[in-house]
Image (tube, grey):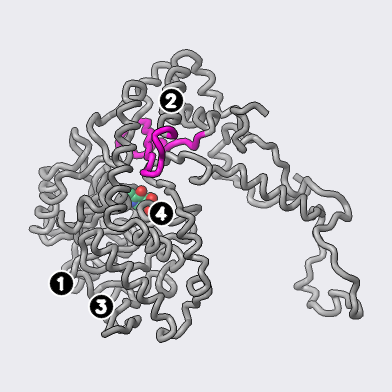
């Protein structure tokens, strides 16, 4: 195999059903020393599976190798640079995994009596305090299982607070640079979403907000830094405008990895902010799996926090369910403890200085990438960025090469593509987030590959249009895959 092909992406692994041979076994057991009984004599017939036509018969080695090879097809943060903007895949420190596996943590059960769970409750209480400190807010709930779930929790608290004030407001303002989930959340929370256009600097102007804000506005949902990777520099002024009319300021703080230790969102007039632990605090992230999107709030919203709330009375921690104005339970028990624990370990191991440095490095890396690539890829907002930068395919258009082609060609070079066609506010977006953990060498390799691809677009555009070529499956028919997904193996097809 040539060096370039040796990426682990190119192995041609058959399905497990296509492997093995008749009579092959993955185990060997000693002879029975009890009388053999037919399964039919013990198990009711409707529970007995009879027909396993085509079921594979494999040895232990066959099975181990099959799944190991499949695992090598995956590209993850532990394989190489993962430049997905917005849905960032972050470094997962191995020390966090060690800590999460400690018996006291791993074996804890949510039905453990509170007296015997004091350490766990203390840890969660302290994590709430740390997140409140980092965001400049008063209280935190750890319950939501993801960023979008945190958004819904936050909007429900705003709605409950307005209800308690006897106000029935209908609208939520959402800028075009907000994350897509902000639009969905405002709709799911039964508000009418009112769009706000960003200005020529790629941020929201106070004038646009003032024009749209009236007594019907329940809240504005601002993503900061926004999805163009730019800091919403007018946020304090915008907050004042919205507050003057009695509305709330919701900040999507999923991009907190650009701000930690530098800016406290609470100081900018934010009333509610959610945090994506997988984006900022290095917890594992994948496939909609167990995550955490804690929500930090200002005092006024405290009565509406989800139950149970962790309280400290003297030196004792307890879970309080007796909160009549609460929005209720947002998640079974207290949230995804294993994820919260990893974030806690990360914050303590980094310390205040370390967290600030992580943000500074994330911003530095993104700006380095942006500066070095801006002669090769069109930069719609040519100004310093935060933790991610957004290019478009405008320079490549004349060669009939699109963002999709560039992304697919990166796969041939052994890189995971960046986020594409998002944010929607620019056409043909290529959104890159290098994160704070990439070394200069790895950034340079990525940059040089992208420069090479920009040259290929001019000289050999077909190479890009036909990419990826060095993988098992090339371009998929995504419409067919979505409309007619094949989710089950069938012996006859
Ligand atoms: C800015 C922003 N807001 C919200 C979300 C939604 O978070 P989640 O995917 O955890 O629901 C994301 C995605 O990571 C995001 O980048």
Mark 3 neighbour density, 10 Å: few (under 14) some (14–19) many (20 or more) = some
Other-residue count near label 1 (Cα within 10 Å), few / some / many at <14 / 14–19 / ≥20 = few
Q: Secondary structure at mark 3?
A: loop
Q: Nearer the viewer, mark 3 or mark 2?
A: 2
- Disc 4 residue crowd, few under 14, some 14–19, many 20+, Cα 10 Å: many
Relative to 199, residue 245 above or below: below
Residue 448: assigned label = 2
Q: Quadrant of residue 483?
A: top right
Could you tell me which residue is drawn at 82 percent across and 54 percent down? Answer: 57
First reached walking from the N terminus: tag 3 or tag 1: 1
Mark 3, residue position: 325
Q: For this view, does 33 lie left or right of residue 281? A: right
Camera-nearest residue between 155 and 376: 376
Q: Which residues are magenta?
A: 415-442
Cα–Cα span, label 3 and label 4: 33 Å
Q: Secondary structure at mark 4?
A: loop
Q: Quadrant of the C terminus?
A: top right
Asked whether the residues under the numbered discs 1 and 2 touch, taking CB atoms below 8 Å apart as contact, a structural biologist would say no
Residue at image coords 47%, 18%: 456
Residue with the mark numbered 4: 282
Based on the picture, tell me whether residue 435 belongs to the magenta stretch: yes
- CA gap between label 1 and label 2 equals 57 Å
Q: Which residue is mark 1?
A: 165
Left or right for 353, reference 166: right
């Amino acid at each position: 195999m040539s060096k370039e092909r040796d990426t682990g992406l190119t192995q041609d692994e058959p399905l497990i059903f296509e492997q093995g041979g008749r009579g092959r076994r993955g185990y060997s057991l000693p002879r029975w020393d009890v009388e053999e009984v037919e399964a039919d004599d013990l198990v009711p017939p409707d529970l007995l599976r009879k027909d396993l036509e085509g079921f594979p018969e494999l040895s232990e080695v066959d099975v181990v190798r099959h799944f190991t090879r499949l695992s090598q097809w995956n590209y993850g943060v532990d394989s190489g640079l993962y430049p997905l903007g917005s849905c960032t895949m972050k470094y997962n420190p191995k020390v966090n995994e060690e800590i999460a596996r400690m018996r006291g943590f791993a074996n804890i059960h949510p039905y453990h009596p509170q007296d015997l769970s004091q350490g766990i409750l203390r840890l969660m209480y302290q994590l709430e305090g740390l997140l409140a400190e980092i965001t400049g807010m008063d209280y935190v709930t750890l319950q939501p299982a993801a960023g979008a779930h945190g958004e819904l929790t936050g909007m429900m608290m705003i709605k409950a607070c307005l209800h308690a004030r006897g106000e029935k407001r209908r609208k939520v303002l959402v800028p075009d640079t907000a994350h897509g989930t902000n639009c969905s959340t405002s709709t799911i929370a039964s508000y009418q979403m009112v769009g706000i256009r960003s200005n020529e600097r790629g941020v929201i102007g106070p004038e646009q907000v003032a024009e749209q804000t009236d007594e019907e506005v329940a809240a504005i949902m601002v993503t900061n830094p926004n999805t163009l990777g730019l800091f919403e520099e007018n946020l304090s002024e915008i907050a004042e405008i919205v507050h003057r009319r009695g509305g709330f300021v919701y900040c999507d703080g999923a991009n907190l990895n650009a701000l930690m230790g530098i800016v406290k969102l609470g100081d900018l007039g934010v009333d509610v902010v959610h945090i994506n632990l997988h984006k900022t605090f290095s917890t594992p992230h994948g496939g909609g799996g167990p995550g955490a999107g804690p929500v930090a709030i200002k005092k006024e919203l405290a009565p509406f926090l989800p139950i149970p709330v962790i309280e400290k009375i003297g030196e004792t921690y307890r879970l309080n369910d007796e909160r009549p104005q609460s929005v209720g339970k947002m998640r079974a028990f207290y949230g995804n403890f294993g994820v919260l624990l990893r974030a806690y370990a990360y914050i303590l191991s980094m310390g205040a200085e370390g967290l600030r440095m992580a943000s500074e490095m994330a911003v530095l890396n993104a700006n380095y990438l942006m500066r070095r690539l801006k002669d090769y890829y069109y930069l719609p907002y040519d100004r310093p960025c935060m933790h991610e930068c957004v290019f478009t395919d405008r320079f490549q258009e004349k060669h009939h090469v699109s963002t999709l082609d560039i992304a697919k060609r990166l796969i041939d070079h052994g890189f995971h593509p960046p986020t594409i066609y998002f944010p929607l506010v620019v056409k043909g977006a290529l959104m890159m987030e290098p994160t704070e953990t990439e070394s200069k060498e790895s950034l340079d390799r990525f940059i040089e590959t992208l420069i090479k691809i920009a040259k290929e677009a001019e000289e050999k555009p077909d190479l890009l249009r036909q990419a990826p070529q060095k993988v098992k499956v090339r371009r998929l028919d995504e419409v067919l895959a979505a409309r007619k997904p094949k989710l089950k193996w069938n012996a006859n097809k």
